């Protein structure tokens, strides 16, 4: 028997990185030396203090049983302390924090908890693809909010028709932004909050890159904005901050009814995060202030190599990111994004991500991730200088 996948699965675009992985494998099979500036997965190891905490906790039988859905109260208290220390934001660990198996899991489940069939979710375009697919899984209708360079990669909230707002239950936002690396000013968040109140929708702010910041910039947490906690939930993750993408731990923080609704849904799907990983996550958050400067310095040094290199190539259509580890570049060659990315793989052995992997408004762009060493970035620049684009 060959079984057919469901209609809801068929409505999804293919996961973009699968196609890229295939192209990459073909290049490797040809013997090419590949420089991977594609997927945003830190190449550096998790700090030792965190690994040591995991080892110790893994030996404790208390962690061998089912973890509780919302996560250990000690872990949630540590999350609350992180928000109090770094953001002067008050969150109640008992009711306003939910542990996640990575923030992707929370993003994927949130619409199932809050959308009814036919409800609209406003989705940034370009954006992390899960906002779109999670909305479809829930029977909702994604409505694309273009992020354009001329608007600082912020959606134009006044351009969305009232008839769409009337059907909107959820808005996804993500700043610092993947893939554009843009930050959002307080006025933008204030405006989004006013729209949410007026039209009665919730805001999910994906803050995966809240800590990935350069040269002393401090992006805003959504919960710092007056009214943020009334209408929203913020998802944060240890993945990017502490080089822990493989560990699968993050959390949702914010409006109690949104946190509890998500938890209600999750209780029916998963059984939480391994206790030893939560213990290690606590140690990560406790050591946030001492660990961050070293982690950030590495990316700042890479960014400088990339920036100097790209300028030397004469490319002008990009801005040096203040946050995230992405550089979002409009290619000047007139090639479609996917053609550009294929050319870079085939002619230079360089893997990047086409802008269209993040939505139609990404056409004409490609994304470089700083998840490889300075030396390899420098080598990539040399290769780029040898081809005509
Ligand atoms: C990496 C990433 C995530 C997922 O992070 P996990 O916590 O590892 O699931 C979520 N949102 C954006 C925008 C990301 O880039």
Image (tube, grey):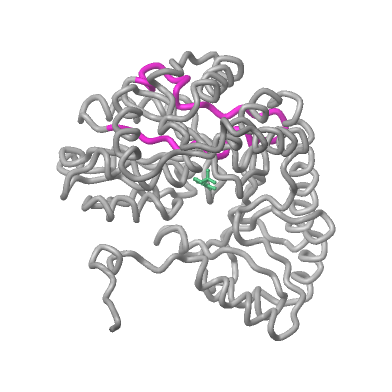
Q: Which quadrant does the C terminus fall into?
A: bottom right
Instruction: Locate residue 63, reporting x and y percent.
Output: 57, 34
Q: Residue drawn at (41%, 33%), measured in percent from left and top?
A: 69
Q: Quick one: which residue is furthest to the right in this view?
A: 375
Relative placement, left or right, of 286 versus 142 is right
Q: Residue drawn at (27%, 55%), measured in percent from left and top?
A: 136
> In the rendered structure, which segment of residues is drawn in magenta?
202-229
Q: Residue drawn at (65%, 73%), measured in percent from left and top?
A: 344
Q: In this view, does 140 lie above or below 31?
A: above
Residue situated in front as seen by the camera: 352 or 191? 352
Q: Is residue 269 above or below residue 195?
A: below
Q: Which quadrant does the N terminus fall into?
A: bottom left
Q: In which quarter of the image is residue 10?
A: bottom left
Q: Residue drawn at (73%, 58%), measured in percent from left and top?
A: 310
Magenta portion: prevailing SS class: loop
Instruction: Locate residue 19, reporting x and y percent.
Output: 51, 73
Residue situated in front as seen by the camera: 146 or 274? 274
Residue situated in front as seen by the camera: 388 or 65? 65
Relative placement, left or right, of 300 versus 57 is right
Q: Quick one: which residue is furthest to the front in this view?
A: 61
Instruction: Locate residue 355, reporting x and y percent.
Output: 50, 61
How many labels sit on residues?
0
Q: In this view, does 211 lie above or below 18?
A: above
Q: Is residue 126 part of the magenta span, yes or no?
A: no
Q: Quick one: which residue is furthest to the bottom in this view?
A: 30
Q: Is residue 203 above or below residue 356?
A: above
Instruction: Locate residue 119, reporting x and y percent.
Output: 19, 45
């Amino acid at each position: 028997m060959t079984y057919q996948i469901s209609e809801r699965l068929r409505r999804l675009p293919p996961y973009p990185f699968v196609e890229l992985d295939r192209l990459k494998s073909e290049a490797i099979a040809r013997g090419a030396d590949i420089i991977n500036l594609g997927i945003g997965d830190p190449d550096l190891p998790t700090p030792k203090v965190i690994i040591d905490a995991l080892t110790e906790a893994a030996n404790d039988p208390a962690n061998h049983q089912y973890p509780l859905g919302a996560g250990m109260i000690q872990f949630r208290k540590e999350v609350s302390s992180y928000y109090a220390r770094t953001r002067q934001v008050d969150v109640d660990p008992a009711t306003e924090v939910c542990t996640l198996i990575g923030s992707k899991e929370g993003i994927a489940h949130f619409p199932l908890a809050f959308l009814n069939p036919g409800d609209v979710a406003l989705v940034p375009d370009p954006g992390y693809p899960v906002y779109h697919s999670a909305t479809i899984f829930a029977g909702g209708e994604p409505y694309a909010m273009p992020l354009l360079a001329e608007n600082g990669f912020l959606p134009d909230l006044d351009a969305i028709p009232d008839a769409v707002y009337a059907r909107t239950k959820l808005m996804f936002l993500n700043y610092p932004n993947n893939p554009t690396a843009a930050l959002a000013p307080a006025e933008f968040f204030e405006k989004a909050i006013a729209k949410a109140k007026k039209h009665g929708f919730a805001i999910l702010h994906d803050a995966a890159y809240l800590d990935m910041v350069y040269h002393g910039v401090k992006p805003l947490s959504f919960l710092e904005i007056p009214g943020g906690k009334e209408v929203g939930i913020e998802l944060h993750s240890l993945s990017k901050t502490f080089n822990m993408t493989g560990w699968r731990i993050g959390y949702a923080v914010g409006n109690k009814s949104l946190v509890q609704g998500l938890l209600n849904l999750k209780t029916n799907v998963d059984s939480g995060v391994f206790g030893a990983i939560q213990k290690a996550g606590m140690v990560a958050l406790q050591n946030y202030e001492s660990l961050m400067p070293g982690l950030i310095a590495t990316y700042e040094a890479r960014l400088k190599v990339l920036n100097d290199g790209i300028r030397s190539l004469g490319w002008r259509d990009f801005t040096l990111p203040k946050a995230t580890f992405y550089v979002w570049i409009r290619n000047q060659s007139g090639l479609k994004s996917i053609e550009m990315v294929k050319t870079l793989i085939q002619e230079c052995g360089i893997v990047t991500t086409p802008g269209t992997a993040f939505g139609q408004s990404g056409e004409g762009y490609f994304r470089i991730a700083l998840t490889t060493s300075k030396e390899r970035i420098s080598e990539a620049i040399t290769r780029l200088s040898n081809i005509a684009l």
